């Protein structure tokens, strides 16, 4: 698999309980979703993790993939609910959080820039936001 010029590649870390939950919205946003096992070959621009079942498990998956790739890629975790321990762990890892209460993901522009996508621990914390 090769990468096309000007293509935004996002590694979709999907929850096994919700297979395919991120691929369709990413394609709608004009991004190319790749699975974590393809990430070393393709080198994604960002990581998007589905944490609707377990935000902490999604944060663990982001940390593991960042370690495996050897870089702090921008990362965002979608979660159904937030608690203080999740926010603290995301802050510590420099991962952005978005509360997603269901339905279709918002348009790509709603993802925002800057603090929405956490840039890794060395770059400081990600942001926390909400979609309803």
Image (tube, helix red, strand yellow):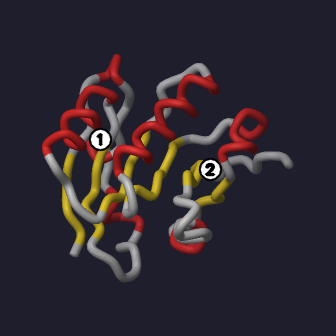
Q: Which residue is drawn at 26% across and 26% down?
A: 92
Above/below status of 6 relative to 15: above
Looking at the picture, how far across and down is residue 10, in whole percent?
Answer: 57, 50
Which residue ends up furthest to the right in the rendered image? 1
Classify residue 89 by image quadrant: top left
Above/below status of 41 relative to 128: above
Disc 1 crowd rating (10 Å Cα; few below 14, some 14-19, many 20+) is few
Disc 2 crowd rating (10 Å Cα; few below 14, some 14-19, many 20+) is many
**Left or right: where does residue 66 sit relative to residue 35?**
left
Task: Describe the element under mark 1 as helix, strand or loop.
Answer: helix
Q: Distance between the residues labelled 2 and 1?
A: 17 Å
**Considering depth in this image, is 54 or 125 the residue closer to the camera?**
54
Q: Which residue is drawn at 42% across and 41% down?
A: 75
**Left or right: where does residue 104 sit relative to residue 69?**
left
Looking at the picture, how far across and down is residue 33, in whole percent?
Answer: 64, 58
**Left or right: where does residue 60 sit relative to residue 43?**
left
Which residue ends up furthest to the bottom in the rendered image? 103
Above/below status of 99 relative to 59: below
**Considering depth in this image, is 2 or 81 the residue closer to the camera?**
81
Which sits earlier in the primary sequence, circle 2 or circle 1? 2
Above/below status of 3 relative to 72: below
Q: Which mark is residue 99?
A: none
Q: Residue at x 58, y 61 (%)?
A: 16
The C terminus, quarter of image: bottom left
Looking at the picture, how far across and down is residue 58, in whole percent?
Answer: 44, 47
Classify residue 109 by image quadrant: bottom left
Looking at the picture, how far across and down is residue 103, in whole percent?
Answer: 36, 82
Q: Residue at x 20, y 49 (%)?
A: 128
Provide the residue designation for mark 1.
114
Task: Describe the element under mark 2 as helix, strand or loop.
Answer: strand
Q: Residue 9 carries which label?
A: 2
């Amino acid at each position: 698999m090769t990468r096309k010029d000007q293509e935004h590649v996002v590694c979709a870390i999907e929850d096994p309980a919700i297979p395919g939950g991120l691929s369709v919205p990413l394609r709608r946003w004009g991004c190319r979703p790749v699975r974590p096992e393809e990430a070393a070959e393709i080198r994604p621009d960002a990581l998007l993790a589905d944490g609707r079942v377990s935000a902490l498990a999604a944060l663990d998956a982001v940390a593991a993939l960042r370690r495996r790739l050897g870089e702090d890629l921008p990362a965002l975790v979608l979660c159904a609910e937030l608690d203080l321990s999740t926010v603290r762990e995301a802050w510590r890892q420099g991962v952005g959080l978005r509360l997603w209460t269901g339905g279709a993901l918002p348009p790509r522009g709603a993802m925002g820039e800057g603090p929405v996508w956490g840039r890794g621990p060395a770059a400081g914390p990600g942001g926390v936001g909400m979609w309803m």
